[in-house]
Image (cartoon, rainbow, N blue to C red):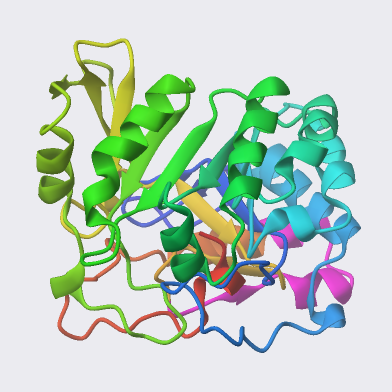
Amino acid sequence: MSAAPGTDGVLVDRYGRVARDLRVSLTDKCNLRCTYCMPAEGLPWLAGPELLTDEEIVRLVRVAVERLGVTEVRFTGGEPLIRPGLVGIVTAVAALQPRPRISLTTNGIGLDRVAAALSAAGLDRVNVSLDTLDADRFTRLTRRPRLDAVLAGLAGAAAAGLRPVKINSVLMRGVNEDEAPALLRFALDHDYQLRIIEQMPLDAQHGWDRSTMVTAEEILASLRTTFDLSPDPAERGAAPAETWLVDGGPARVGVIASVTRPFCGDCDRTRLTADGQVRACLFATEESDLRAALRTGADDDELARRWRTAMWGKRAGHGIDDPTFLQPTRPMSAIGG
């Protein structure tokens, strides 16, 4: 067990894990209404003054990079592409020393129009959410007929050099569980990297039911009806995806088994919500307020101290299998996936 948090310049918890990967939610708003994320009518969005400004985001990321050892920054949402200042934020973060690796998780709508500017600003790569290749299913899942826009966004990201372009897919029983082979074939044909994710309890309606979740074993069995999969000899490290060589490689596919094969013991993530709260875990029920400290004159040393204290309290695991597990009180769009 580590000593209590001090001023050693890293985000360490009491189990010795060090957080070097920062996920930053830029907005709680989204231009889709995915059934596993939010209700059709949307959610009560955060008021403008509650959101961090562009300058506040950059300052907190700078504290994380310069004083707390963060080496990777991923911008998320909601949908980060609808944040007006996104390109400027990426530009400022890319100018930090040491320069962190910078990525973006997006639904891809509008990405084709801004991918070149983001690449020029310093964005390294993107993850695009895509759960189906069927236009009718896409509309039912997202409540928006925008599949063509997502496919255009993927192509635009690749053309802008934001590689590797990764696809994140969630399979749901009775909805799209049959699409794993088709999604992988699509990814291979376009030189994208597919990651299939077990559905997690992050919906605003709290309607998640483990019995309807498509498990990692089922995902792999479905993929093996079409492809030969063999274990990836590369070291996994803190990566959430367990990867497999496809037909002998070099192509790979990843499965993120957050529920059935949790990787909490190797977790290296810290999270900053769109309204300036530190979350030690995606499933945490507690948050630590950096926005109030920032707006009442805290200096960088104090912000770093508060961040270290927040991460020290990180739990050993997410607790999904605990009978007393409580879903986060805020939806994924407000937390950042």
Q: Residue at x 81, y 40 (%)?
A: 113
Q: Which residues are magenta?
A: 285-304
Q: Position of residue 103 (x, y in %)?
A: 63, 37
* x and y, in percent, of residue 135 in the image: 48, 55
In the shown orientation, is residue 337 left or right of residue 248? right
Point 23% across, 19% down: residue: 245
Residue 152 x/y as whole percent? 65, 38
Is residue 75 visible in the rendered image? The answer is yes
From the viewer's side, name the closer residue of 243 and 289: 243
Q: Nearer the viewer, residue 265 or 43?
A: 43
Q: Residue furthest front?
A: 136
For the residue pair 328 and 64, the one nearer the viewer reads as 328
Q: Residue at x 74, y 62 (%)?
A: 302
Q: Is residue 129 left or right of residue 301?
A: left
**Direction from residue 111 to residue 177 in the image, left or right:** left
Q: Position of residue 239 (x, y in %)?
A: 37, 36
288 magenta-colored: yes
Q: Is residue 323 magenta?
A: no
For this rendering, which residue is in front, 117 or 286? 117
